[in-house]
Image (cartoon, rainbow, N blue to C red):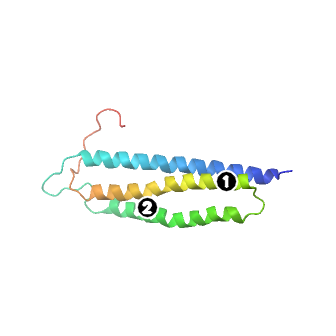
Amino acid sequence: MPDLRLVWLVDETMDALCAEARLYRNMAVLGRAITARIALFPVEQPEVYVDADGTLEAKLDEVASRFESLLSTFTAKKGAVNQDSRLRAAHCDMLHSAYDADTAARTWTPCTSRALQAVLRVERPSRLPAPRGPAR
């Protein structure tokens, strides 16, 4: 007879990993949309920057670095799945799939932060015009 608490814990872990993956994918989509929107604005002379003092760029670098360091911890947690003798093969397969999906979603966040940093280094108007129509 399967341990119902173990089944519940596996289910809870799966739900949490799937929710995190959705969150990180949405963050990446939003970051790419912001990057694309900023990149559309023409370069102005003299030098006028959206992030003139580099505050936003420094915060984005911090976000990217934190996510990259968390990936190694996350990979270790995924590896621990195989060490738990209470888990059946099916549990391990489900958890590995969920960890893989979450890891893939997490890797977009540092990439998006780095892309946004690159766009901010280019001269842009300090006052961005209001959006015209719905964002896509």
* Residue 42, x across and y down, in percent: 19, 47
- In this orientation, does residue 121 appear? yes
Is 127 situated left or right of 8 in this image? left
What number is the disc on residue 37? none
Pointer 2 and pointer 1: residues touching (CB < 8 Å)?
A: no
Q: What amino acid is found at the position of numbered circle 2 in the picture?
A: Val
Q: Percent position (x, y) of residue 126?
A: 23, 51
Disc 2 packing (10 Å; few <14; some 14–19; many ≥20) = some
Label 1 residue SS:
helix
Label 2 or label 1, whichever lies nearer to me, is 1
Q: Residue at x 13, y 54 (%)?
A: 45
Q: Residue furthest right?
A: 1
Residue 54 position by quadrant:
bottom left
Q: Is residue 83 above or below residue 129?
A: below
Q: Which mark is residue 93?
A: 1
The disc placed on residue 63 is 2
Q: Position of residue 47 (x, y in %)?
A: 16, 58
Mark 2 or 1 closer to N-term?
2
